[in-house]
Image (cartoon, rainbow, N blue to C red):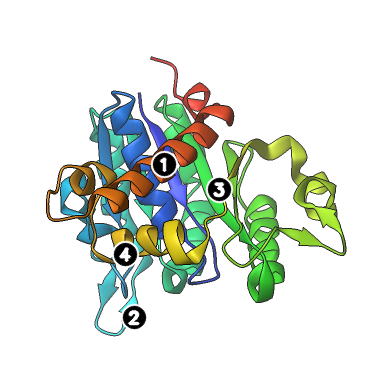
Amino acid sequence: MATVHLVLQGKGGVGKTMLATVLAQYLRERGRSLLCVDTDPINATFFGFGALEVQRLEIMEGDEINSRNFDAWVDLVATTESEHVITDNGASSFVPLAYYLVSNEIPGLLASMGHTVTVHTVITAGQALLDTLTGFDALARQLPTECRFVVWLNPFWGEVTLDGKTFEEMAVYKAHKKRVSAIVRIPRLKEELHGHDFRKLLESRLTFAEALAAPEIGIMVRQRLQQIRRGIFDRLDEAAILDLEAAA
């Protein structure tokens, strides 16, 4: 049976694909088999990571998203022999996919097959804070109880706080606390060194393993990427992500 990871957030540019790629690399390094799928109809960035062998699912018909095309995604999940399925979804297809999941009772269907559904969503600071909190709130209210949540706190624009309150002190978290299985606190990286190198890594569509094995990448850049990988993977260990696996 598979653990189905859905990366969902209605706000664009907050780190959804970073989340998907890091999660995929983490699970692979821990010896898990993966099926990776990109459903973003506009920016199929996840698909660009060749080492992760991401399948692209075409959901457009002409200029419109056809929710029926998500049927192919269900078929992929239902028949997979992989232990984990990671699906990255774009902001433009956020509403259609959420509607599809709810109206077709997909989480319950997958649960009846023995799969588990985990929704990963990102909360950021700065101007996107309220939008990402609203996105999390909408998902928690709309998606059924078969879906559990992992919240990733992205400090790229600063610490995730609102009126001096941490995420766990916010009303939206307290309202949905029982739905949240884990919180992943992404380490904050200083832009001039570690942050710059991590951004360039993502822009190059390289995994950590590829970059660390590339002799053309400088020694100190590889050193910093090694530190970043260790820091993020340690946070995933602390969040006990592997404890969310589906029962064999």
Instruction: Estimate the spatial distance between the alpha carbons at disc 3 and disc 1, rounded to whole Å.
Output: 13 Å
Q: Closer to the N terminus: mark 2 or mark 4?
A: 2
Which label is found at residue 227?
A: 1
- Say left or right for 190 vs 221: right
Q: Amino acid at mark 3?
A: Ile
Q: Closer to the N terminus: mark 4 or mark 3?
A: 3
User: Between tags 4 and 3, which lies in front?
Assistant: 4
**Quadrant of the image occupied by residue 41:** bottom left
Instruction: Estimate the spatial distance between the alpha carbons at disc 2 and disc 4, rounded to whole Å.
Output: 32 Å
Q: Amino acid at mark 2?
A: Glu
Answer few, some or many: residues within 10 Å of disc 4's Cα (few below 14, many 20 plus, some between 14 and 19).
few
Instruction: Depth check: give the residue in front, 75 or 243.
Output: 243
Local SS, label 4: helix
What residue did someone put label 2 on?
Answer: 64
User: Between tags 4 and 1, which lies in front?
Assistant: 1
Q: Amino acid at mark 1?
A: Gln
Relative to 32, does residue 176 appear above or below in the rendering? below
Relative to 77, does residue 88 appear above or below in the rendering? below
Instruction: Estimate the spatial distance between the alpha carbons at disc 1 and disc 2, rounded to whole Å.
Output: 42 Å
Q: Amino acid at mark 4?
A: Lys
Q: Closer to the N terminus: mark 3 or mark 1?
A: 3
At 23% from the left and 65% from the top, the residue drawn is: 58
Which label is found at residue 186?
A: 3
Local SS, label 1: helix
Residue 156, position as x, y percentages in the image: 56, 63
